[in-house]
Image: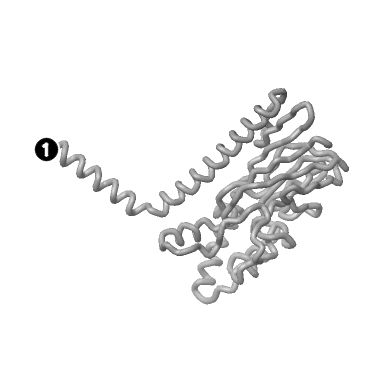
């Protein structure tokens, strides 16, 4: 009898936890699905390559790139997370030596919107996108954020590349938009203008310590009254914490890139 009571108590407790944490559970499920898809895709690709050509070597860079070298080609596979601005692939490319990109995958740049829509059983306003990014342009509320977009000329969510030479500043919040960035598209060839490390990122808004006024305007937008005061207080906390990646932490998903370095 005591055992039955205990089982009922456990069931009620489980229902309470699930009922109170629907958002957390949905969020964890989304992360799990995205990770599982990436792992399965990589495994399938490796299996295919092994069947096609058993004579190849696989190595891994410290930054997460998988380098595959066979008799006839040299290729790299890299998983680019949507939640991290400017990632060093660890791949060295050479000046005037073309490289070819093949990209796939999907990302979402407003996970809070996605979860809220799922809870309300309505279609989300912000949808998932592929490597080409959102082609509908910026939303009205994002007008004030456009100056802090990593590549203002490119679609939000598009893959952006940068070849960092030894003399270049490391890209990030203090160096948001290097001068020689380029767009990465599916089945496109890029010829580096200099030798250096290949850096990649997903085009999104990135606050920075070097342009407080620009970042402040981007964060508070056109809010008024108490809402504006609240946003200013929040921005002061961001400054104190150095939390420049706030809009990247709202992203989920990955792009998988195959980088053909055969001619490099």
Left or right: residue 70 versus residue 234 is right
Q: Residues within 10 Å of mark 1 (few under 14, many from 20)?
A: few
Q: Which image quarter holds the N terminus?
A: top left
Q: Nearer the viewer, residue 234 or 144?
A: 144
Q: Position of residue 56 (x, y in %)?
A: 71, 25
Q: Residue furthest bottom?
A: 225
> Is residue 30 left or right of 177 when viewed as pictured?
left
Q: Is residue 240 visible?
A: no
Foreground residue, 130 or 151? 130
Which colour style is shown? one colour
In the rendered view of the protein, which quadrant contains the C terminus?
A: top right
On the image, the x and y values in percent for residue 74 come to 76, 32
Q: Residue pushed farthest left?
A: 1
Taking the spot 66% from the left edge, 66% from the top edge, the residue there is 137
Residue 126 image-quadrant placement: bottom right
Observer-nearest of 37 and 109: 37
Q: Residue at x 43, y 51 (%)?
A: 26
Q: Image point 52% across, 70% down: which residue?
A: 229
Residue of label 1:
1
Q: Is residue 257 above or below residue 54?
A: below
Q: Which residue is situated farthest in the top direction here?
A: 55
> x and y percent of residue 6 in the render?
19, 40
């Amino acid at each position: 009898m005591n055992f039955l009571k205990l089982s009922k108590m456990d069931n009620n407790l489980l229902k309470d936890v699930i009922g109170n944490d629907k958002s957390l559970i949905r969020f964890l499920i989304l992360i799990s699905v995205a990770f599982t898809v990436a792992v399965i895709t990589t495994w399938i690709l490796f299996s295919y390559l092994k069947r096609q050509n058993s004579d190849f070597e696989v190595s891994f860079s410290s930054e997460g790139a998988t380098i595959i070298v066979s008799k006839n080609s040299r290729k790299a596979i890299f998983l680019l997370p949507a939640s991290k601005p400017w990632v060093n692939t660890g791949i060295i490319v050479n000046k005037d030596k073309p490289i070819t990109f093949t990209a796939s995958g999907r990302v979402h740049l407003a996970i809070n919107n996605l979860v809220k829509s799922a809870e309300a059983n309505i279609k989300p306003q912000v949808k998932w996108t592929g490597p080409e990014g959102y082609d509908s342009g910026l939303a009205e509320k994002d007008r004030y954020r456009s100056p802090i977009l990593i590549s203002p000329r490119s679609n939000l969510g598009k893959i952006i590349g940068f070849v960092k030479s030894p003399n270049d500043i490391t890209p990030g919040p203090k160096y948001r938009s290097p001068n020689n960035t380029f767009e990465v598209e599916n089945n496109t060839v890029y010829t580096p203008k200099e030798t250096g490390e290949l850096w990649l990122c997903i085009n999104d808004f990135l606050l920075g310590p070097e342009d407080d006024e620009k970042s402040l305007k981007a964060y508070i937008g056109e809010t008024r009254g108490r809402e504006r005061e609240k946003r200013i207080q929040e921005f002061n906390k961001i400054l104190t914490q150095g939390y420049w990646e706030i809009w990247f932490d709202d992203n989920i998903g990955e792009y998988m890139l195959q980088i053909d370095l055969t001619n490099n």
